[in-house]
Image (cartoon, rainbow, N blue to C red):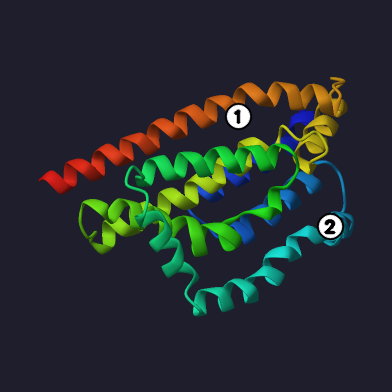
């Protein structure tokens, strides 16, 4: 039974996210909980967290990209994105986001997770284009526009989260492998990657249906 105590870190994450606490506080708290219950001292747990942070230098990419995105937005990037999508008669918010979902999953599946994201693509391009597509039937109120933007952000999260596990050299796959290995279950990263594919397909289909339902809801609201 004691072997399962470190898994309480998962409970910390579930409760923390469920109560909508700051993720920057929830994730370290979960890591500390798991480490301490696994028998590590506080200094070792903090050292391991620091090493993981410095080893993952790719997390610095958004901070490098943000000034560039800011300059592009200042010179009309969002307006150009809206103008482009307005030229496609058949484009809807749902259809556009389904295409982005497919793109996000595919690039994440080959390890290019950081080439798109909330800062790089959603805010400057995808969200404005989705709103422009939704506005073809008429102007949107602020609440509806925010809902479309939220779907754009969620689409990026779903695509990245379920797509990246297909890439067998990503950190999440290695973490799963090491966790299973600790309990005597030997699986290669490639095996885990293969079994992530059905989940990714299911996530794509489920979220695509949600996006099509978004289109239907927007059309119904315009008619009412």
Q: Is residue 19 visible to the viewer in this orientation of the structure?
A: no
Q: Residue 83, image x and y in percent?
A: 39, 62
Residue at the spot of label 1: 200
- How crowded pointer 2 is (Cα within 10 Å; few <14, some 14-19, many 20+) is rated as few
Residue at left offset 82%, top offset 41%: 38
Residue at left offset 38%, top offset 42%: 94
Residue 215's place in the image compared with 192, above or below, is below
Residue in front for this viewpoint, 51 or 183: 51
Number of the label disc, if any, that sits on residue 97: none
Residue 84's place in the image compared with 18, above or below, is below
Give the residue at the far left of this rendering.
224
Residue 167's place in the image compared with 63, above or below, is above
Residue at the spot of label 2: 42
What is the tally of numbered marks visible in this picture?
Answer: 2
Quadrant of the snapshot with the N terminus? top right
Q: Residue 69, image x and y in percent?
A: 59, 71
Label 2: which secondary element: helix
Residue in front for this viewpoint, 106 or 2: 106
Q: With 125 as the anchor, is 176 left or right in this view?
A: right
Label 1: which secondary element: helix
Q: How far apart are marks 2 and 1 (CA)?
A: 37 Å
Q: Is residue 38 visible to the viewer in this orientation of the structure?
A: yes
Quadrant of the snapshot with the C terminus? top left
């Amino acid at each position: 039974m004691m072997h399962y105590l470190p898994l309480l870190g998962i409970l910390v994450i579930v409760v923390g996210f469920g109560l909508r606490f700051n993720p920057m506080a929830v994730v370290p708290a979960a890591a500390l909980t798991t480490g301490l219950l696994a028998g590590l001292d506080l200094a070792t747990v903090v050292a391991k967290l620091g090493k993981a942070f410095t080893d993952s230098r790719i997390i610095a990419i958004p901070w490098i990209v943000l000034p560039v995105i800011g300059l592009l937005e200042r010179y009309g990037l969002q307006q150009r994105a809206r103008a482009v999508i307005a030229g496609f008669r058949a484009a809807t918010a749902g259809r556009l986001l389904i295409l982005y979902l497919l793109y996000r999953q595919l690039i994440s599946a080959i390890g290019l997770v950081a080439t798109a994201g909330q800062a790089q693509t959603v805010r400057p391009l995808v969200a404005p284009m989705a709103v422009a597509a939704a506005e073809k039937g008429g102007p949107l109120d602020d609440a509806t526009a925010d809902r479309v933007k939220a779907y754009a952000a969620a689409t990026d999260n779903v695509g990245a989260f379920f797509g990246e596990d297909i890439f067998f050299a990503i950190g999440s796959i290695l973490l799963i492998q090491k966790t299973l290995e600790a309990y005597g279950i030997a699986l290669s990263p490639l095996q885990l990657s293969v079994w992530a594919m059905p989940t990714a397909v299911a996530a794509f289909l489920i979220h695509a249906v949600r996006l099509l339902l978004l289109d239907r809801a927007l059309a119904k609201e315009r008619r009412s």
